[in-house]
Amino acid sequence: MSTVRDALPADVAALARLAAVTFPLACPPHTTDESKAAFIATHLSETSFAGYVADPARDVLVADQDGELAGYVMLVAGDPADADVAAAVRIRPTVELSKCYVHPDSHGGGVASELMGAALERASARSASGIWLGVNQLNARAQRFYGKHGFTRVGVKRFLVGESYEDDFVYERAL
């Protein structure tokens, strides 16, 4: 059992380590190690997480298991900046579920569902009417998980990993 709580500045290093383990697991097999490493260095570094944790438009929640981070989610409040997402998302105001990752040692243990529940509660607390996310079109496991939690596919978008674009589905659900 984990405790879901707000990430603290003291969690930044652990978040970066967790992200470096979990992000590659969500990438399709054709994504190069160089592209994954570039994305991690640019978006999932300690510096990046320090900014995310401090940003009032973001909520970073962690699943804490006896002082170790088992997973995390990140919400981003506000309308989508991506034109494809803005066209696909129908419910406003909305919040993006930007990240939802669990350490592989905790897969199947309910951590992801605990994090999702907390993320949905937090999005509602921000007075959002809907929540959206992007998920790689080849990540069937994640798509099943999001479907189980009430998300439906509403569109497509592209996602830059390193120097290569990946194809994502856009999922949305009402809160």
Image: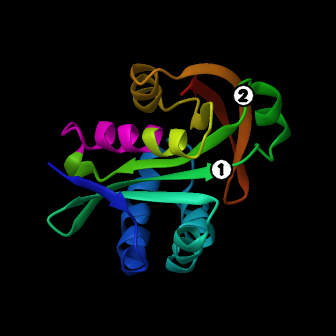
Seen at 20% across and 51% down, the residue is: 105
Q: Which mark is residue 156?
A: 2
The kind of residue tagged 2 is: Val
Q: CA distance from mark 1 to mark 2?
A: 20 Å
Nearest to N terminus: mark 1 or mark 2: 1
Looking at the figure, which quarter contains the C terminus?
top right
In the rendered image, residue 37 lying in the magenta stretch gets the answer no
Asked if the magenta segment contains residue 114, the reply would be yes
- Per the rendered image, the range of residues in magenta is 107-120
Kindly tell me whether residue 83 is visible in this rendering. Answer: yes
Q: Residues within 10 Å of mark 2 (few under 14, many from 20)?
A: some
138 vs 107, nearest the viewer: 107
Residue 117 image point, x, y percent = 37, 37
Identify the residue at horizontal 63%, vertical 42% (top origin): 95
- Lateral position of residue 139 relative to residue 79, left or right: left
Asked which quadrant contains residue 18, the reply is: bottom left
**Taking 147 as reference, is 166 left or right?**
right
Query: In terms of secondary structure, where does tag 2 sit?
Result: strand
- Label disc, if present, on residue 155 of the rendered structure: none
**Callout 1 environment at 10 Å: few (<14), some (14 to 19), or many (20+)?**
many
Q: Mark 1 — residue?
A: 77
x, y (%) of residue 86? 80, 35
Placement of 127 over or under 14, stated as above or below? above
The residue tagged with tag 1: helix, strand or loop?
strand
